[in-house]
Amino acid sequence: MKYEISVTGMKCQNCAKSIENGLKSIDGLLNCDIDVKNGTVTVELNQGGENLDKIKSTISDLGFDVA
């Protein structure tokens, strides 16, 4: 399943790389696409949405605001 998450505070590709690296270790994450310009993180999970809260929490812990 794919989910699009609105994220504020991303200003550059270094921000995107930080989020990407932070999400790599989450079980069930198949793909992650980060669009700095539009302020979105699109994730694809292989186990429904059970890890969506963990993804949002990880992004928030990195210092970004998740809508």
Image: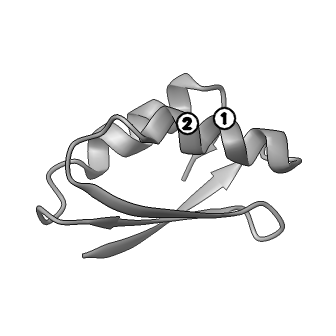
* Apparent side of residue 33 relative to residue 50 in the rendered image (left or right): right
Identify which residue is drawn at 65% across, 26% down: 63
Identify which residue is drawn at 38% across, 70% down: 3
Occupied quadrant, residue 15: top right
Occupied quadrant, residue 21: top right
Q: In the structure shown, which secondary structural element does the residue marked by tag 2 occupy?
A: helix
Residue 29 on image: x %, y %: 30, 54
Q: Residues within 10 Å of mark 2 (few under 14, many from 20)?
A: few
* Apparent side of residue 19 relative to residue 17 in the rendered image (left or right): left
Give the numbered dot on residue 67.
none
In this rendering, the answer to whether 62 lies above or below 7 is: above
Occupied quadrant, residue 31: bottom left
Residue 45 on image: x %, y %: 25, 64
Residue 43 on image: x %, y %: 42, 64
Between 46 and 58, the one nearer to me in the picture: 46
Residue located beneath label 2 in the image? 21
Residue 50 on image: x %, y %: 14, 52
Between 44 and 7, the one nearer to me in the picture: 44
Marks 2 and 1: CB-CB under 8 Å? yes
In this rendering, the answer to whether 64 lies above or below 39 is: above
Identify which residue is drawn at 64% across, 52% down: 7
Q: In the structure shown, which secondary structural element does the residue marked by tag 1 occupy?
A: helix
Identify which residue is drawn at 81% across, 40% down: 14
In this rendering, the answer to whether 54 lies above or below 5 is: above
Q: Amino acid at mark 2?
A: Asn
Residue located beneath label 1 in the image? 18
Q: Amino acid at mark 1?
A: Ser
